[in-house]
Image (tube, rainbow, N blue to C red):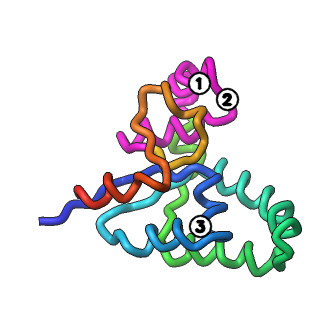
Amino acid sequence: MSSSRAVVVDANILLRAIFGKRVSGVLSKFENAEFYTPEHCLQEARKNVPIIAKRKKVDTPSVLQLLDELLEEGMILPIDHNSYDGLRERALSRTAKHDPTDWPVIAVALLLSAPIWTEDRDFFGTGIATWTTDRIEIYLRDA
């Protein structure tokens, strides 16, 4: 019997999904998982796409289209800030020694009782399970 697993995706994973192959492969491989991201991470990813696209010498609009396709196909499910704003203080209390701008990711993880998929070490020690790309499949396979 298969059950769905929720995972909160950080902005750096969104960027890896559109600029790389491994993350997008994981997203499409695990149909038993639902990948969520706060609105904040989508904004952060969109802001960084032109910088990375220029460095990688790829067309910014086509890369942004890939991000849009992930959303349109439901591979990444955006969470509106109104859904997690009420958890701001609780999330900020967990980021005190880390990057306070990460609070939306923590808030969504608290909201969904879900782990975070990230490459950002700032999430370690926040009391929320954190998975990196090289380990996320362990979590997803056990669903």
Q: Residue at 45% x, 68% y: name it.
A: 27
- Residue under pointer 2: 99
Residue 46: x and y, percent?
A: 75, 61
Tell me, yes or no, whether the highlighted magenta stretch contains residue 101: yes
Looking at the magenta stretch, what is its main secondary structure? helix
Category of crowding for the residue at label 3, using alpha-carbon neighbours closer than 10 angstroms: few (below 14), some (14–19), many (at least 20): some
Label 3: which residue? 17
* Numbered label attached to residue 95: 1
Pick the residue in front: 63 or 40: 63
Quadrant location, the C terminus: bottom left
Give percent across and percent down for residue 38.
57, 49
Residue 127, image quadrant: top left
Q: Are marks 2 and 1 in contact (CB under 8 Å)?
A: yes
The residue under the point 60% across, 32% down is 122
Instruction: Magenta stretch: give its range.
Output: 86-115
* Position of residue 118 in the picture relative to residue 47 (left or right): left
The image's mark for residue 63 is none
| Tag 2: amino acid | Asp
